[in-house]
Amino acid sequence: MKQEVLRSSLKQIRTRLGMSQQDLASLAGVTRQTIGGVESGQYAPSTTIALRLAKALGCHVEDLFWLEEDLPEIEAIPAQNLPVGEGLRVSLARIGGQWVAHPLIGKDAFRTEMIPADGAGNLLPDMDTVLVKLLEEPEKLLHTAVLAGCSPALSLWVRAAERWHPELRVHLTFANSMTALQRLCRGEVHIAGMHLYCPQTQEHNTPFVQRALVGKAAVLINLGVWEEGLLVQQSNPKRLKTIADLAQSRVTIVNREQGSGSRELLGMLLQKENIPYEAIQGFDSIVNGHQEVALAVATGKADTGVSTASVAAAFGLEFIPLHRSRYDLVLLKQYLEEAPVQQLLGTLGHRQVISQLQALGGYDTSLTGEVVATVEASHNGRHN
């Protein structure tokens, strides 16, 4: 039998209303000592006294008193970016029949506000699992979908989906295209967002998924086709027009990290023009994320960087288009049967999602919500 502890918010509500202990005691018809004993936890009120206190404060008994059980603990597989330590705030989701713990640290701890934790984890060195003390009802955790990606449009989609399905929870974790795909392969996420182009096959995303997934079938669903190019300040002070202009000695860039679609695109275009990477000032100046590229350009830390038309518009920057890139959502076919994934994907073609993507600018939504490719399971590293 789990030990139950009586908790009370009596003091907080009383002080918020500007009442002294004697004021409340007089209204409720009890002694001041009774109020003091309840607030200190030394006295458990009878049903009669609890009802009197609630009536005097104009609230429900459940607002004043509740039973708190010892929090249950579960074992979860740690995401590979979960640091070693105790008391780590984590978000939990059921993925492929097992619990997965994602750390709420850095960017992943926020949307616009701090994200509440599902539990506090304890990951020690040489442990294969993390022991998580729950801070949320276990039933609620079963309604969680986990999405990794770098597109700012993902958060618009997620917020809309959670409005339509109040029980749905989406944990959106930042990751560039290759990192998102790797997290999908490791079973850490349900959906990976990516925008990588293969010049050999002249295809987006599918060749990378084929190489990464062995023995697993997957589908690629389109989020949108976006314009990628160079961000520059208003009036384009360096008069940049093409990728070849980046080799000018007076031009500095900011680059993305390894595995990002923007970095891959920049490298591909430079190779096409036979421009060595070392000829570009700032090629090794790395930031993580589209917003960070835009911020570096907007604040004058760099003259330009590769991102999208929608990000340029959000930061009031000018945009030089270079490539139309397909941003796809990749998920294993087995996840299509999971209820939270179904709910999330079911909102993708909704009018309000489409209109939000179109309002961003630089998004072609003609393929949004469509299955653009499938990858069949293979055990020899080759896929159909």
Image: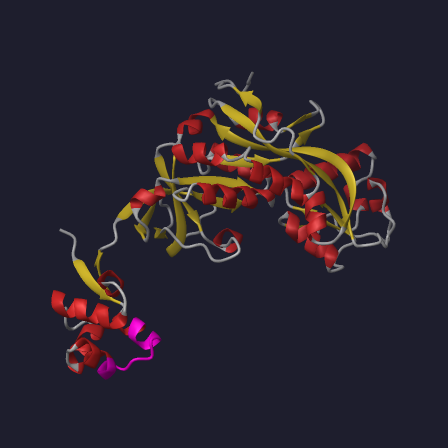
Magenta stretch secondary structure, dominant:
helix
**Residue 129 can be seen in this image:** no
Asked if residue 147 is among those painted magenta in the image, a careful observer would answer no
List x then y, in percent, for residue 325.
Answer: 69, 33
**Which residue: 57% across, 26% down?**
370
Above or below 25: residue 201:
above
Nearer to the camera, 318 or 290: 318
List x then y, in percent, for residue 157.
Answer: 54, 41
Please state the extent of the stretch shown in magenta in the rendering.
Answer: 13-23
Residue 179 position by quadrant:
top right
Residue 142 position by quadrant:
top left
Nearer to the camera, 140 or 352: 352
**Which residue: 30% across, 48% down?**
137
Above or below 332: residue 227:
below
Q: Quadrant of the C terminus?
A: top right
Left or right side of 337 for 205:
right
Asked if residue 17 is among those painted magenta in the image, a careful observer would answer yes
**Which residue: 74% across, 48% down?**
305
**Residue 168 can be seen in this image:** yes
Above or below 333: residue 124:
below
Left or right side of 308 for 239:
right
Residue 221 position by quadrant:
top right
Nearer to the camera, 163 or 330: 163
**Which residue: 27% across, 48% down?**
73
List x then y, in percent, for residue 63.
Answer: 27, 63
Left or right side of 231 for 68:
left
List x then y, in percent, for residue 259.
Answer: 62, 39
Above or below 182: residue 282:
below
